[in-house]
Amino acid sequence: LIVFFFAEVLASLLPIFIGLLFLFGGIIRLVQAFGYRRVMANRWMYFLVTSLLWLGIGLLLVTNPFSSLLVLFQLFGGFLIAVGVMELILYITLRRSRRQVI
């Protein structure tokens, strides 16, 4: 019943909630990036860029919630595609560095 009666209010809070999740994820990734700095010489910068991307989108969503959810979901979808590509690059980088250590 709460969702039915307060759907508009909940929809307006959605960008802020998603923004907070991105901020939290960005902080976690930033800590991981600095942890990888000791293990990987120059490749840890990929992790740093990804974490800064997460933090930037999170700040954008929290400070400037969009009035249109369509724009939010388009931006969110584009960001998820970019993150997916970066995660694939990071996986390949980690796999290569692990093979070099072994």
Image: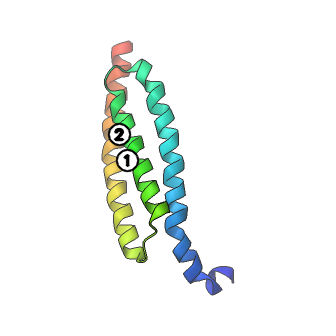
Outermost residue, right side: 1
The correct choice, above or below, for 18 with respect to 90 in the image is below
Q: Residue at x 62, y 83 (%)?
A: 6
Q: Amino acid at mark 1?
A: Leu
**Label 1: which secondary element:** helix
The correct choice, above or below, for 26 with respect to 98 in the image is below
Q: Amino acid at mark 2?
A: Val
Q: Which mark is residue 88?
A: none
Outermost residue, bottom side: 5
Other-residue count near label 2 (Cα within 10 Å), few / some / many at <14 / 14–19 / ≥20: some
Q: Contact, CB < 8 Å: mark 1 with mark 2? A: yes
Q: Residue at x 58, y 79 (%)?
A: 9
Quadrant for the N terminus, please: bottom right
Q: Which residue is mark 1?
A: 53
Q: Residue at x 40, y 69 (%)?
A: 72
- CA gap, disc 1 and disc 2: 6 Å
- Of the pair 36 and 66, the residue shown nearer to us: 66
Q: Position of residue 62 (x, y in %)?
A: 49, 61
Horizontal side of residue 22 vs 72, given as left or right: right
Other-residue count near label 1 (Cα within 10 Å), few / some / many at <14 / 14–19 / ≥20: some
Horizontal side of residue 14 vs 94, given as left or right: right
Q: Position of residue 76 (x, y in %)?
A: 39, 62
Q: Which mark is residue 49?
A: 2
Q: Position of residue 96 (x, y in %)?
A: 32, 24
Q: Quadrant of residue 88?
A: top left
**Label 2: which secondary element:** helix
Q: Residue at x 58, y 75 (%)?
A: 10
The correct choice, above or below, for 101 with respect to 11 in the image is above
Q: Position of residue 97 (x, y in %)?
A: 35, 21
